[in-house]
Image: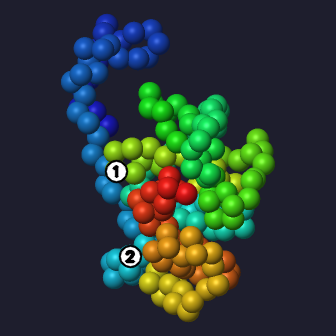
């Protein structure tokens, strides 16, 4: 509630206050919502990640890496680039590379259907984009969900993965080492 009173002569017909009166309204104070996720000890052991699917792979990057979705961006082919380079697109006035993780990991071409999402990541001070089969989702894993036994996975994926987690439903998620992974994409 505000501490300002408006006389009936100052009220506008629509019930709105005058701009000069809006400046004198004190900002509301909000009480933070209580955290429902459990104890502080439980929260500190959890890793927050942005997950997305590429083909049959569940991939994640740290939630600290800025991830944006670009649905209507035109991608222009780039000749003589890395094999995994699909092309370039414009984002916020920058020309950024667009890569195919399918091509990088399997050396096979994938039809770029209309239902693929273009995910744009900001790594350090530059942008990079990839195609994903799904929109990114926030994932949270605890250290108890780390998968320690070795998996029979692609060598390139193994080199770019910092952690592997297993969800309660059995799905395996690969946490990519963001900067290293995107540098590897640009070299391949």
What numbered label is drawn on residue 133?
A: none
| Residue 131 horizontal side relative to residue 6, left or right | right
| Residue appearing at x 54%, y 76% in the figure | 158
Identify the residue at horizontal 36%, vertical 12% (top origin): 11
Q: Secondary structure at mark 2?
A: helix
* The one of 114 and 141 positioned closer to us in this rendering: 114
Image position, residue 119 (x, y; %): 57, 47
> Which of label 2 and label 1 is nearer to you?
1
Sequence-wise, which precedes: disc 2 or disc 1?
A: 2
User: Where is 131 relative to 148, above or below?
Assistant: above
- The location of residue 21, given as percent across then percent down, is 26, 18
Q: Which residue is mark 1?
A: 124
Q: Residue furthest bottom?
A: 149
Distance of label 2 from label 1 (alpha carbons): 26 Å
Q: Is residue 54 left or right of residue 89?
A: right
**Which of the pair 76/94 is nearer the observer?**
76
Residue 76 location, quadrant = top right
Decide: few, some or many residues near mark 2? Use Cα within 10 Å; few <14, some 14-19, many ≥20. Answer: some
Disc on res. 43: 2
Identify whether 147 is placed above or below 61. Answer: below
The C terminus lies in quadrant: bottom right
Q: Quadrant of residue 168?
A: bottom right
Q: Residue at x 56, y 34 (%)?
A: 89
């Amino acid at each position: 509630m505000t501490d300002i009173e408006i006389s009936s002569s100052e009220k506008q017909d629509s019930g709105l206050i005058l701009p000069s009166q809006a400046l004198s309204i004190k900002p509301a104070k909000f009480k933070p919502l209580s955290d429902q996720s459990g104890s502080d000890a439980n929260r500190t052991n959890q890793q927050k990640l942005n997950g997305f699917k590429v083909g049959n792979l569940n991939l994640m990057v740290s939630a600290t890496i800025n991830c944006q979705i670009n649905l209507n961006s035109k991608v222009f082919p780039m000749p003589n680039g890395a094999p995994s380079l699909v092309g370039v697109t414009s984002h916020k006035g920058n020309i950024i590379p667009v890569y195919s993780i399918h091509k990088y990991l399997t050396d096979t071409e994938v039809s770029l259907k209309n239902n693929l999402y273009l995910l744009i990541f900001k790594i350090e001070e530059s942008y990079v984009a990839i195609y994903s089969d799904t929109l990114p989702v926030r994932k949270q894993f605890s250290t108890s969900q780390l998968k320690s036994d070795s998996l029979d996975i692609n060598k390139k994926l193994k080199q770019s993965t910092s952690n592997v987690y297993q969800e309660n439903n059995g799905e395996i998620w690969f946490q990519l080492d963001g900067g290293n992974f995107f540098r590897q994409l640009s070299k391949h």
